Amino acid sequence: MSDQTLPAQKPRGAESPLRRIIAEFFESRTAAVGLVIFALVAFVALFAPWISPQNPYDLSQLDIMDGTLPPGSESFTIGTYWLGTDVQGRDMLSAIMYGLRMSLIVAGTATLLALAIGIATGTAAAYFGGWVDTLIMRIVDMQLSFPAILIALILLAILGKGVDKVIIALVIVQWAYYARTVRGNALVERQRDYISAAQCLSLGHGRVMFRHLLPNCMPPLIVVATVQIAQAIALEATLSFLGVGVPVTEPSLGLLIANGYSYLLSGRYWISFFPGIALLITIVAINLVGDQLRDVLNPRLRK
Amino acid sequence: MSINRSIRGALMPATFAVFAAMSASAAADTLTIGLSAEPTSADPHYHNLGPNNALAKHIFSALIEQDAQQLLAPGLAETWEPLDDTTWEIGLREGVSFSNGDPFTARDVVYTVCRIPTVPDAPSPFTLYTNAIAGMEIVDDHTIRITTDGPAPLLPNHLSTFTIISASASGAEDEVAFDAEGCSGLGDTPESQAFTDPDFAIGTGPYVLSSFVRGDRIVLERNPDYWGEEGAWEEIVLRPITNPGARVAALLAGDVDMIENPPTQDIERIESSGFKVSSGLSNRVIYIALDQGEAPTPGISGDANPLQDAKVREALAKAINREAIRDRIMLGYSEPAGELLPPPMFGTNADREAIPFDEAAARELLAEAGYEDGFQITLGTPNDRYINDGQIAQAVAQMWSRIGVQTDVDAKTFSAFISDRNGFAFSAFLAGWGAGTGEMSSPLGALVATRNPDAGLGGTNFARHSNSQMDDLLIEALQTVDEEAREALLQEASRVVMDSYGIIPIHYELTTWAMRDDLDYEARADQYTLAYEVVPAN
């Protein structure tokens, strides 16, 4: 956050706002734990191809003769299957690492894209007002009145399968949240003197919107984005679980859980259980971080 | 006292002895079965679909019955003899009456054949099996002569596929006369919906319809005047429970006495909980079809279509480890296949073994065909139609990848898969075929005969395989009335296709039923669940 856009806050203290946020963030031990866990998950996801014992997406590395082995079984090729294997002989540990990677990439990309679209439309709606505002906000209202999973299912039924299609579906489902958040904040900020001042200087619309208005709307957006990224991960997992998401040969966490679902009754719990735990940990960690960020960034809760 | 209630009683240990005594007597009363799919109608001629046909056989009877191995057996007809190449004489059983008391006569048979083409909006009509009939002559009340345009050796098989309804109860006039262009004396033919009404569903079957509540249950009661052996149960309740997990849970909880198609991975659990599993070879083969029609082909990059080369097809066939699929994915409930119909069914080659797994030979064949470095291919598959279909496709992809053919799997829900397949969108796809007639001309005619809609051949040949030698043999077989000569022709036709790897069979499905251990059911090749053939175990 650059100083030039926050002239009113400058005299408050010598330390920069960023430092204050970091300091306040770590006041909560749970949030700190959440952040550490999330960093670990992100590390595993990022470096999965180098640290996983097997490439579960390379079919020629799999052997169905190693299928549905319980955790701790020995294999001839990659040592021990610490978390067991699924019916195709995929090492569950590797599959979870790659699944996390797939889930985070899909959710992360979708969130960034949705954020961009939401910011552009939301700021435009607030800044221009009038029919632009009405049009954009009615579309947002319409979309928010349907459950996200329903919209995503319809979209994927039309678009077909594939990682790119899932990302498109998630973006379309989520941009409305950001648009609404940005608009609400921008409407308040627009009344402030510094915007009038900028407009008096005949600065272009784009410059006023994105250099002056937007940076002051960021804090609530960051909070919404952290909540939404967890939502996106869960939504992607749901879609894959329902069989409309990622390809079967490149399972994400949701698909791994779905694969093991039919084996639960027969006692082969590990196929669903471990990916489920991984999904749970990831989402909880992100939510812990998001909650604390919300508290820290909310001016009303500021000490 | 229903079985359900008595099982709940067993929760109290003190009443256990009482319960055991009661359940023995209750067992003769009601049998409840969890179906894996609900019949789409109670009309026996509406939809040629397993669940519908199985339900129809409870309420109605066919002229000719199929036994558990699909061999023909007398039903409402006691005899069927060819008088010459195009005339058959059918002798009907005497002394049979419908559940409303009317006697069964030749008029009902003619009416049924006439009614079949009139069923409105039938999604899969039985006209497939009545088309060959060119004339029907009522000789007397219990003798019919059927003439056909050409030789129709499969007529008895076709007559075994549909059941006979009552002409009088359906509103026919006293004189019903057959005419291939349009029968006379039919009156107003009934709508399919009408058969849901127990007063309208009048048949000669072992049971009569008591109620049909869509999505919930179908209740049947014993027909005291049935012409054959009396069913063991006073009442039969068929409950559609389409979710496999819920079906198993219903069995384990004692809500139902028997279920269809328990998931293979749950069978161990079911058996260890004191239930019994009955399984048998079905008439359904799971196969992979390889597009041999055009180059380029959609799922393979490049201008060539390697699948047109028999060596490549042989390589792909030999790269599949069928035993591994049986052991690891089907958990023993399949039989590796070398043809399109399991022996000893009609027209199979008993000496033909499953295609052997030979990775080295497969690599060599690929190299000989000029594909040392393999190629990329997409394998289409449904993921909710056949037993473990999506998993089988992934295993095949694994095995093909290992010989250098990089394989992607495109798994879809069945309806989406069908529309893609019928649009020739796949270079390779996995599917299944159940031989309704129980003999070899069914899979050969549908899956590998050269596409010829006018002749009714190659209807499901979406791989566009074409082999004139096989076509000639098949067409000759379809016109040969002599059983032995026909079987020899079909065996030869099957051999020709398999030798050129025109289609790659994987395995025959085993159909399974799970039930209380005091029940017995002989597994049927046609996969029908016939409640009246469920008997208390000795």
Image (tube, rainbow, N blue to C red):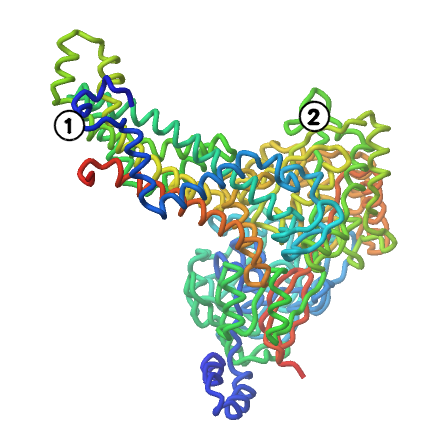
The amino acid marked with disc number 1 is Val
Q: Are marks 1 and 2 in contact (CB under 8 Å)?
A: no
x 31%, y 30%: residue: A19
Q: Chain of mark 2?
A: B
Q: Residue furthest top?
A: A202
Residue B452 visible, this angle: no
x 52%, y 33%: residue: A162
- Residue B42: percent from the left, percent from the top? 48, 61
Q: Is residue A56 left or right of residue B247?
A: right
Locate residue B514: give its quadrant. bottom right
The amino acid marked with disc number 2 is Glu
x 64%, y 74%: residue: B94
Q: Chain of mark 1?
A: A
- Residue B339: percent from the left, percent from the top? 78, 49
Which residue is the site of mark 1? A188
Residue B337 visible, this angle: yes
> Could you classify mark 1 by the number of other residues whose Cα lies within 10 Å: few (under 14), some (14-19), or many (20 or more)?
few
Which residue is the site of mark 2? B294
